[in-house]
Amino acid sequence: MDTWQELEQECLRCTRCKLCSGRNNVVFGVGNKQTDILFIGEGPGEQEDLQGVPFVGAAGKFLDDMLSIIELDRTKVYIANIVKCRPPHNRDPEEEEQQACIGYLRRQIELIQPKIIVCLGRIAARQIIYPEYRITREHGQWINRDGIWYTAIYHPSALLRDLSKRPDTFEDLLAIRDKMRFLGINASAE
Ligand code: URA
């Protein structure tokens, strides 16, 4: 298995897809590598590309607020994206770009060995849980695969745009807290 350092070095040099040509920074991931809970977004936006850190723009601030509802923060969880380089004009990452990049996330998952994976939005849910995932219908549901519990919640950007989705997400967040308790996860900062 890789070390974190090997994986990150390889990812920072990556030219596997065309997104490399427009990037300022590869956005590898942030947070606690010893965590039991991994959050997966879609791909970097403008601020993330400029700073090299996931979820630092408006959606990121909102994600921090969401985490704080269940007493989590970036010192207690790990946050990564399906694609590590910014798609131009914040378009959805293409399937080809996702496929080129997904190996890095798989290796991050192997290193972290999380007990819970939370997909943020449709793109991550479809790539990680299953390809036909319907976020509107299936958010907040849980599946266990190979000992890992998977769920998806609305993407923070969707919650910024559409206030009507927030009550459901509040419930989904409480369910994540309950699942952590059920699994005996004590998400203290390490
Ligand atoms: N949206 C994402 O999905 N990921 C980020 O890192 C920022 C915004």
Image (cartoon, rainbow, N blue to C red):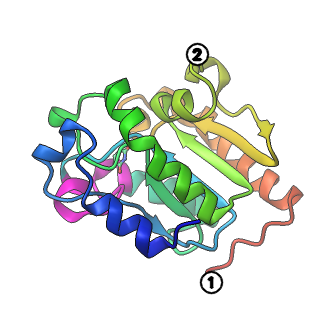
**Quadrant of the rendered structure where residue 187 is?**
bottom right
Give yes or no for residue 48 being in the magenta stretch. Answer: yes
- The residue depicted at 36 percent of the width and 55 percent of the height is 55
- The residue depicted at 80 percent of the width and 44 percent of the height is 146
> Residue 157: which numbered mark, if any?
none
Crowd around label 1: few <14 · some 14–19 · many ≥20 (10 Å): few
Question: In x, y percent, where is residue 114?
Answer: 68, 59
Q: Nearer the viewer, mark 2 or mark 1?
A: 2
Q: Are marks 2 and 1 in contact (CB under 8 Å)?
A: no
Question: In x, y percent, where is residue 27?
Answer: 31, 57
- Residue at disc 2, secondary structure: loop
**Quadrant of the rendered structure where residue 82 is?**
top left
- Residue at disc 1, secondary structure: loop
> Residue 190: which numbered mark, if any?
1
- Please indicate whether residue 126 sits to the left or right of residue 182 in the image: left
**Quadrant of the rendered structure where residue 5 is?**
bottom left
* Residue 123 higher or lower than 76, as above or below: above
The answer to whether residue 16 is visible is: yes
Question: In x, y percent, where is residue 156?
Answer: 43, 42
- The residue depicted at 41 percent of the width and 28 percent of the height is 162
**Quadrant position of the N terminus in the picture:** bottom right
Crowd around label 2: few <14 · some 14–19 · many ≥20 (10 Å): few
**Quadrant position of the C terminus in the picture:** bottom right
Q: Earlier in the sequence, mark 2 or mark 1?
A: 2
Which residue, given by chain and number where applicable, does mark 2 sit on?
132
